[in-house]
Amino acid sequence: MPRITANGIRIDYELSGPPGAPVVTLSHSIATDSRMWEPQVEALAPHFRVLRFDTRGHGGTDAPPGPYSLEQLAEDANALLEALGIDQTHFVGLSMGGMIGQMLALTRPKRLSSLTLCDTSARMPPEMRPEWDARIQTTLTAGMEAHVEPTITRWFTSGFIENRPDVVDSVRALIRETDVQGYVGCCRAIQELDLLDRLPEIRLPTLVIVGRDDPATPVEAAQAIHRQIVGSQLVVVESASHLSNLEQPEAFNHALLAFLGKVG
């Protein structure tokens, strides 16, 4: 993948699709990288210029010492767009990527044409903070391997794990390959998430997508976001857990393309 320096770090990115077409930017979850968007790139690239990138601490992007903040991760994305000469983009973020999308919409609203928030949350409940502390401690003592199977069971339904080992194994590999320092830095950013009360400031066309069976950022979290963003649309993807874009790519892509088709 090409690499460019933005906001003081080297960021890996990939652009595909016709030059001159509207840009769609894809932002991945924690413990993956831009490769998790393969089914969406395939669907979007005939119609859009598709930008996907590796978040700070992930994939081929630099992993400087943390902790990181959501403001910092959003500014990374903004600086990348600036460096590539992209004035405006549709932004699609899943899980951590959706948190980055919310922050970007609040801090750099003119940069975005629309916002799609997938399997994400706008507030980290206080009772969840100790769980993130535990994840960080596990990472520092046992590495990413300790997260592989617990994460897979949160991210996919049991039937999908059994029936699609090809997809699940590819995600296992992404988790294993995640830089420990990068993962911990992003955990700290997620741990501080508290944007729900600010969401009414967002006036962009917004789509909220969530897997029906997502235990990590459940339907209730998506509904809370939907209620706070005026005019937003909510789509619940059946038979999908946290990585709904990989578990039900046809339904996910249908919702996304229909939304992007309406907002231009």
Image (tube, rainbow, N blue to C red):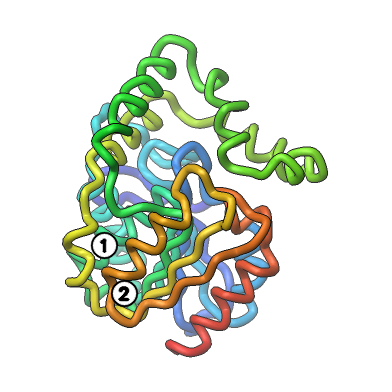
Q: Residue 246 versus residue 49: which sits nearer the camera?
A: 246
Q: Is residue 88 above or below residue 223?
A: below
Tell me, yes or no, if residue 53 can be seen here.
no
* Residue 132 coordinates in the image, percent (x, y): 34, 28
Tell me, yes or no, if residue 41 can be seen here.
yes
Q: Secondary structure at mark 2?
A: strand
Is disc 2 in contact with disc 1, using a CB cutoff of under 8 Å? Answer: yes
Q: Residue at x 25, y 58 (%)?
A: 103
Q: Residue 99 versus residue 39: which sits nearer the camera?
A: 99
- Count residues near mark 1 (Cα–Cα under 10 Å), then give few for <14, some for 14-19, many for 20+: many
- Count residues near mark 2 (Cα–Cα under 10 Å), then give few for <14, some for 14-19, many for 20+: many
- Name the residue at the top extreme: 141
* Residue 146 coordinates in the image, percent (x, y): 54, 18
Quarter holding residue 8: top left
**How far is mark 2 from mark 1, CA to CA?**
8 Å
Identify the residue under disc 1. Answer: 104
Q: Residue at x 61, y 35 (%)?
A: 152
- Name the residue at the right extreme: 163
Identify the residue under disc 2. Answer: 112
Question: With 68 as the anchor, is 43 left or right in this view?
Answer: right
Ranked by sequence position, the earlier of labels 2 and 1 is: 1
Q: Residue 31 versus residue 216: which sits nearer the camera?
A: 216
* Residue 258 coordinates in the image, percent (x, y): 56, 83
The amino acid type of the residue labelled 2 equals: Leu
Q: Quadrant of the C terminus?
A: bottom left
* Residue 197 coordinates in the image, percent (x, y): 18, 60
Q: Is residue 206 above or below residue 171?
A: below
Q: Residue at x 31, y 70 (%)?
A: 227
The amino acid type of the residue labelled 1 equals: Leu
